[in-house]
Image (cartoon, rainbow, N blue to C red):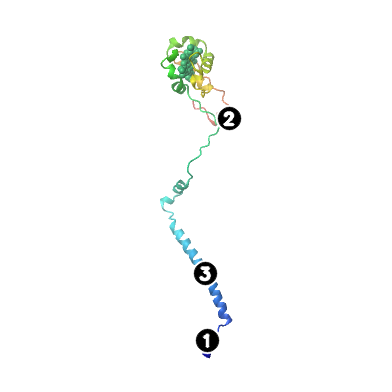
Amino acid sequence: MSEQQGTSKTSPMMILAAAVGVFAAPVIAIVLIVQLVLSIQAGHVDKDDPRMADAAVQERIKPFGEVKAIDPNAPRVEKTGEAVYTEVCASCHASGALGAPKYGNKGDWGKRIAQGYDTLIKHAAEGLRSMPPRGGNPDLSDTELARAVAYMTNAAGASFKPKEPAAAPVAAKAAPATK
Ligand code: HEC
């Protein structure tokens, strides 16, 4: 009895060792778990996998929808005379509807052309009897209208040089003339 008590007697050193063990065990466990997780993650990303290529990843994680910024100061792209004629003017001027002078018909256009380019543009812009202002499309710019008038009248014997706006130096630099 007394011998047993002697061997189970706890020394201060043993208490210290036990205390260190109690605190150290969880810390070691945590360190090991973290290392395990990190190694699993590292093994997970296969850099040679094509799906992990930079471009492929960018494609997958890119945000939905793209915003295309439109610069309100950007020079407007003016339509050609032919495009304006086809879209707007042809509905009347191709067939001569409402008494419109027909496209390419010198007899219809002769006297009108004699009025001069500026007057024709003015009438096209403001309207003339059954001819609606700007052919009914208020979005047409002066340049587009002038081009359409030249396109139409030149097809009927005139030789007007389409009026182009005096290009602003900045706009001219930003968009070098292609036409
Ligand atoms: C809704 C039918 C209609 C459309 C669309 C139309 N026109 Fe006309 N246009 C007429 C008619 C009708 C006349 C003849 C007016 C008159 O002299 O009584 C005319 C005449 C003209 C004239 C001759 C004006 C003059 O001084 O004799 C010009 C130039 C002209 N149109 C240009 C255009 C252009 C450019 C467009 C397209 C941007 C256009 N028109 C679209 C009906 C139309």
**Label 1, residues with CA under 10 Å away: few <14, some 14-19, many ≥20:** few
Q: Is residue 144 visible?
A: yes
* Towards the viewer: 27 or 109: 27
Q: Given the image, on which type of amino acid does mark 1 rest?
A: Thr
Q: Nearer the N terminus, badge 3 or badge 2? A: 3
The numbered mark at residue 7 is: 1
Ligand 1 contact, mark 2 (Cβ < 8 Å): no
Regarding mark 2 in the picture, which secondary structure is present there? helix
Q: Residue at x 53, y 73 (%)?
A: 22
* Towards the viewer: 107 or 88: 88
Q: How many marks?
A: 3
Q: Nearer the N terminus, badge 1 or badge 3? A: 1
Tell whether 13 sits left or right of 149: right
Q: Position of residue 178 (x, y in %)?
A: 49, 27
Q: Given the image, on which type of amino acid does mark 3 rest?
A: Pro
Q: CA distance from mark 1 to mark 3?
A: 29 Å
- Write down the quadrant of residue 94 in the picture: top left
List the residue tagged with mark 2: 170
Q: Given the image, on which type of amino acid does mark 2 rest?
A: Val
Q: Is residue 159 visible?
A: no
List the residue tagged with mark 3: 26
* Towards the viewer: 59 or 92: 92
Regarding mark 3 in the picture, which secondary structure is present there? helix
For the residues labelled 2 and 1, say whether their Cβ atoms are less than 8 Å apart.
Answer: no
